Image (cartoon, rainbow, N blue to C red):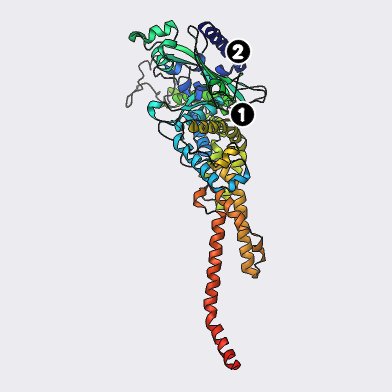
Amino acid sequence: MLNEDDGKDRAQAIAKRWDTAGNARGSLDSLCEEIARRILPNYAGSFSSGGHSLNTPVQNRTEEMYDATGALALTRFAAAMESMLTPRNSQWHSLQPSDPTLKKRRNVQLWFDELTQSLFKYRYAPAANFASQQHENYMALGAFGTGATFIDKLQPRYGRGLRYRAIHLGEVRFCENHQGIIDTVIRRFPLTARQAAQKFGVAKLPEKIRTAAVDMKKYDNSFQFIHYVTPREDYNPNRLDASGQPYRSEYVSVEGPAHLLDEGYASFPYAISRYVIAPGEVYGRSPAMLVLPSLKVLNEEKKTVLKQGHRVVDPVLLAHDDGVLDNFSMRAGALNYGGVNAEGRALVQVLPTGNIMIGKELMDDERLVINDAFLVTLFQILTETPEMTATEVIERTREKGALLSPTMGRQQSESLGPMIEREVDLLMQQGLVSPMPDILRQAAGQYVVEYDSPLSRAQKAEGISGFFRLVDWSQNYVNVTGDKRPLDWLDWDTAMPEIAQGQAVPTRWIKTFDAVMQMRQAQQQAAQQQQMVDAAPALASLAKPMMQGAK
């Protein structure tokens, strides 16, 4: 721990790093604020204050939101991303050893199966809060192009496990290393004096916060803090203290300033996801940014149509200025004498309002663009054509997978991969995983993540479908010609384990290669014995004449 003077200097340096890291954001905050007011009103006003206005009481923030198309499309986008990437009702990934030879070791496969099950068990535990926070992350991804999730251990008072928290983009800034990998996160966030005392201890707090923390009247006074995570410059893997952790974690108080905590992480605690990145930019760009002009135009068109619709429902009346109609009544059932002349010609006319359907058609054009950007129309392909055959479904699914692969690939490599690495590290730190097999330990426990989400499964299913199409074709050929030679090309012993793996069948449900060979050997021996039993009467009948002839 740094002394008071060094701690103050370090805290000031970190606060300055927060300011300099903000230069890379440019006008991002104002752009996100503009988007939030139109499609995500819960976030309206939060970017102008660094994400802190979310702590204010409930307010109506929909003043600039005249049409809900963008908000509904964003919600569907988040639901689609979850269903295709991290569906909560299925096991959407597995862990496998990096060394292909270790895949043949049953004890290694069973250990990885157990590890995968443990990940899903603790990830979707109620106290972990993963599902709701991941949904918030997908919403931020669609609206602002960047999502951030903090993954940490569950507090001891709640047991052992994992805990997730979606971080507001307004309170986090990050930097890339020379390879374009995010390795530094600076998060500025508020805590009340009471919360700060709980997290850091009263003794470590600056005088002003310490005074508030022990005064019941000032418990809820809010103060600013910074969490700074970056690669450790003095990293020494042989040490057991914080210096032996590759990432340095520091908490500082802006008020004071003061250096509060200096710890370490064995794995990067933040999972940052970006939708797409423009050249030279660090932060992501979102579908909402792409169609922001359409969102603005649709809002203005909706205001115009509402005004015009009001005129149609409650029209403007035109009357001759002769004083006869001064007391004209618009009440239902009212009689207005003098509204027509002696010939019956109306003296009151309705102001023409134009063709309101043109406005509706223009709005529908903008809605189509918005829904396309948020992938809504793409996910309607299967639901709107339920009469498709199985082959058509496979082809449509494959087409959908091709269109979504770039987006989904970035999420897997940039967000989900680091998140899983962090989860494995935390579970092993807490002893929630069985000891690693010796042969795997000798290989340094290297593993790869194999994604089994609906999207990746659809991509893998192409080879499996092709194999069974070949089986069907070969069977038809055999039925027509009686020639069984095409079946000789089908290697079922090689195909079945890979088909089982592609269909997400747990390893423990599948027999090992040795067990299958033993079973076949036993069946072959039993068949030979049965043949001998069946052939015994015939052999006896042949042996009897031979024995008589010999006499």
| Label 1 residue SS | loop
Q: Residue 521, located in which quarter of the rendered image? A: bottom right
Q: Is any atom of residue 352 visible in this view?
A: no
Of residues 259 and 72, the one drawn nearer to the viewer in this rendering: 259
Observer-nearest of 378 and 298: 378
- Farthest residue toward the front? 551
Name the spot of residue 459 as percent of width and height, x first. Answer: 60, 44
Q: Which one is nearer the viewer's eye here, 154 or 270?
A: 154
Label 2's element? helix
Q: Quadrant of the C terminus?
A: bottom right
Looking at the rendered structure, which numbered label has been put on residue 214?
Answer: none
Residue 242 x, y percent position in the rendering: 53, 21
In this rendering, the answer to whether 153 lies above or below 382 is above
- The residues tagged by marks 2 and 1 sit, at their Cα atoms, a distance apart of 23 Å
- Crowd around label 1: few <14 · some 14–19 · many ≥20 (10 Å): some
Q: Residue 327's x, y, as percent?
A: 35, 16
Numbered circles on residues, count = 2
**Amino acid under disc 1:** Val
The residue indicated by pointer 2 is 20
190 or 292, nearer to the observer:
190
Question: Which of the 4 quarters of the picture holds residue 293?
Answer: top right
Badge 2, how many Cα within 10 Å: few under 14, some, many 20+? few
Residue 537, can we see it? Answer: yes
Q: Who's the residue at 55% across and 16% down the image?
A: 30
Labelled pair 2, 1 in contact (Cβ < 8 Å) = no
From the viewer's perspective, is the residue at label 2 or at label 1 nearer? 2
Q: Earlier in the sequence, mark 2 or mark 1?
A: 2
Residue type of the residue flagged with mark 2: Thr
At 61% from the left and 64% from the top, the residue drawn is 475
Identify residue for label 1. Answer: 276
Residue 147 placement (x, y as % from top left): 54, 26
Task: Please say if 19 is above or below 387.
Answer: above
